[in-house]
Amino acid sequence: MESVRLSVNINKIALIRNSRGANLPDLTQIARDCEAFGAQGITVHPRPDERHVRFDDLPLLKATVRTEFNIEGNPDPRFLREVMLVKPHQATLVPDGPQALTSDQGWDTAKYHDFLVDVVAQLQSVGTRVSIFVDAEERFVEGAKRVGADRIEFYTGHYAKIFSQDPQKAVDNHVRCAKLATELGLGVNAGHDLNLKNLKFYKEQVKGLMEVSIGHALVCDALYYGLQNTIQMYLRQLN
Ligand code: PXP
């Protein structure tokens, strides 16, 4: 079975740091430790109000991360400028509004076609791979291909919500859309509300899945099990 990369989203760690105004916990040390504990990538999601990771964290993290650095977010002019300076391995474009509590849907890749074509090309011109966050619907996958993206990231929030009642129903559209994406030559990532209960089934069902980015549940689990154990527990679900 293929292994799927675990990218740990460290936004919640930044939130704890910001709550006290000093540098505890140290985000770059956390990134280093996540990698030492087995994470195969580090994800951050700078938002306009910088309530989690801040834009000035990005160059430090880029210099620190040895696996894969993924910056996700809404490509407003500031995001685009800062991300193009940092040149992460991957940028994941997310259509969340400035006040959004968290991302809760993917792009309408037809409606935003022209905008996305431009942003994708700009990011790729500095050597950054571009992934587009989409709901698992065929039309959005096809639209992602048309704007020139390298990958898609499926929004798994709905999957996570339905999983406990009907796992197969929850995952069916992801299975179909991952197959389509692979046929179109798009890589497949996934994220949002993935956790120790719903991750293994998702990974087993969604063929071609390359990477998951997980933040909230993983950080919550780490409160009980510790960061090292928790990362190992997530890796065991994936491999
Ligand atoms: N992927 C995207 C695009 C996101 O916006 C988020 C949340 O920041 C995640 C993945 C991770 O979601 P969670 O924190 O629920 O694991």
Image (spheres, rainbow, N blue to C red):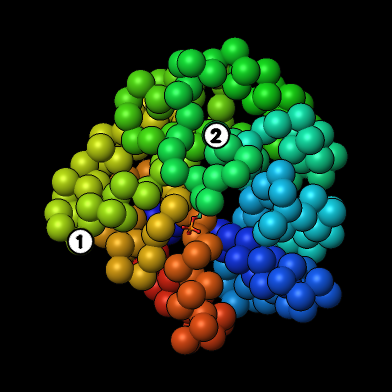
Label at residue 29: none
Element class at badge 2: loop
Camera-nearest residue between 60 and 209 = 60
Query: Eyeballing the image, is 75 above or below 206?
Result: above
Would you say 223 lies left or right of 29 here? left
Q: Going 56% across and 27% down the picture, which residue do you hit?
A: 149
Would you say 166 lies left or right of 37 here? left
What's the CA distance linking mark 2 and mark 1?
A: 27 Å
Would you say 22 lies left or right of 193 here? right
Disc 1: residue Cβ within 8 A of ligand 1's nearest atom: no
Image coordinates of residue 76 in percent, x first then y, are 70, 31
Would you say 43 lies left or right of 126 here? left
Q: Amino acid at mark 2?
A: Pro
Image coordinates of residue 128 in percent, x first then y, are 70, 37
Specify which label sits upstream in the sequence, 2 or 1: 2
Image coordinates of residue 61 in percent, x first then y, are 78, 59
Query: Eyeballing the image, is 92 above or below 3?
Result: above
- Badge 2 crowding class, 10 Å Cα cut-off, few under 14, some 14 to 19, many 20 or more, is many
Quadrant of the frame with the N terminus:
bottom left
Query: Eyeballing the image, is 123 above or below 47?
Result: above
Quadrant of the frame with the C terminus:
bottom left
Label at residue 95: 2
Camera-nearest residue between 26 and 138 = 26
Q: Going 41% across and 21% down the picture, which residue do you hit?
A: 142
Residue extending furthest top? 114
Q: Quadrant of residue 63?
A: bottom right
Label at residue 164: 1
Q: Amino acid at mark 1?
A: Ser
